[in-house]
Image (tube, grey):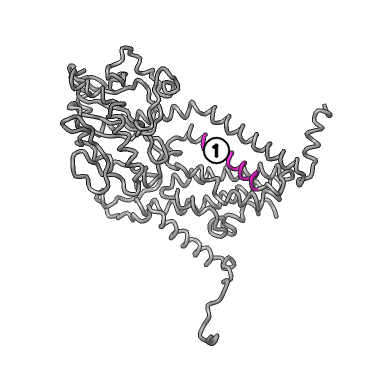
Amino acid sequence: MSLKHHLIAPLVGNNPITLQILGICSALAVTTTLSTAITMSVALTVVLCLSNCVISLMRHHIPPSIRLIIQITIVASIVIVIDQFMQAFMFEMSKKLSIFVGLIVTNCLVLGRAEACAMRNAVLPSVMDGLGNGLGYSLVLLIVGALREFLGTGALMGVPLVTTVADGGWFQPLGLMQLAPSAFFILGLLVWLVRVLRPEQVERPEFRLRTREDGRS
Amino acid sequence: MAELFSPVRNFFARSNDDLVKIIGMAVLVALVSSAAVSVTAVMLRPYQEANRAAEQQARMDKMLDTLPGMRDLMMETGVDTLETRLVNLDDGSFASSDDAAAFDLAAALQDEEASIALDPDADIAGIKRRANQSPVYLLQKDGDLMLIVLPVYGAGYQSTIRAALAIEADLVTVAALAIVEQGDTPGFGARIEEPDWLAQWPGKKIADETGTVRIELVKGGASTPYEVDGISGATRTSNGMTNILRFWLGDKGFGPFLTRLRQKGL
């Protein structure tokens, strides 16, 4: 697989959220506004690149019996360091993201990529894979964040685009969009859209519903 | 030089299934990771503390803005912020030293001389130690007290809640409550920060005519001036808030200070 493939494939074709269904929890939590979605995307992409890089560097010396513990320790340290930096230099944003920066540790995307890619590949492809998956995650987060903020408040990045009814305009904000379930709806619609465009992503059903022709039992 | 590194090289040359290598790698990763985390935490602490201090100041200012007419009054008296005084909590007198700005709560709590250990029975706010002194913030006009702000803190559900309680000149009526810092569950306990909830505090009474502290957070429908609606789904945060106020308005807290103010004035 070429470097370019590592970078491009996770964007749509092998997108971590819509196909691999990883990292859903944070995708629900931080997408109420576009700005938090952007910050979370950047933070996760950085963590993913760094953790893939470090783990790929030491992949020959990670004993298989304790590899998950080592991976999670490395990921956790990187996340804590980034969280500390955010608290020092991006205080407002770190307050908005609250616990979700810390929860990057438990984002299965990070450990998933470490296990699936960084443990087996050289540094450069691993970093590319981290970057690609990070960008794929970011793409979905940005779409969901933009839709939720616009439909829920009539603004983007905090800048009002249409006047809401409360301010004497015509736009009635859809309060549901600010609640977690709406992220599920949007994600579901996104997965549907991607699978309509790319039918090869549709999994075969695990079992078939029995029809009348199958006979009685 | 080569001999110096040979044990290291030998270690890394071991098989990944070798027990020494497994334990060695675990220790190595743990050491390097903890070093990285500690170094960043220590190096960035000054920046983070500056951020928190600015945040607390901003919240205090915001609370002043919510008090009707408070800014006008401050303009009139020609001050742009509240006056900070240090209070001796045991007898309620003002401390003579005027270095209230330099008061360091964290240092006082570490110091055996500057703080006392609290009895578990008396420690309803869950703070274990209480400093002997506390800053208070006040606004006066021609020698008359207009507003006093008491900093209070204690255990919430999973974090320490720090709040500022502003009391009017009668020393009974709440002017406002501001949450300065808290880390309770987002969406539940953390709702004590919401303006809608804080808006029900002005006008509440902290104590009845006999001076008994009565203020409390109740479940469903506050009916007396001493009751404030608690937060549904956050019983322990609500109880924590009640206990924090009860403690700090009580004998071990600002009780003696408030009594003294009532009797003798500033």
Mark 1, secondary structure of its residue: helix
Foreground of the two, A207 or A27: A207
Q: Is residue B65 magenta?
A: no
- SS majority, magenta: helix
Q: Is residue A82 magenta?
A: yes
Foreground of the two, B171 or A13: B171
For residue B26, side relative to residue B177 (left or right): right
Foreground of the two, A113 or A135: A113
Q: Which residues are magenta?
A: A68-84
At which x and y percent is residue A169? 26, 52
Total numbered badges shown on the rendered structure:
1
Q: Quadrant of residue A62?
A: top right
State whether residue A109 appears in this view.
yes
Foreground of the two, A42 or B203: B203
> Which residue does the numbered mark 1 point to in the structure image?
A80
Q: The residue marked by circle 1 belongs to what chain?
A: A
At which x and y percent is residue B106? 43, 24
Query: Residue at 48% across / 25% down in the picture?
Result: B46
For residue B264, side relative to residue A190 (left or right): left
Residue type marked 1: Ile
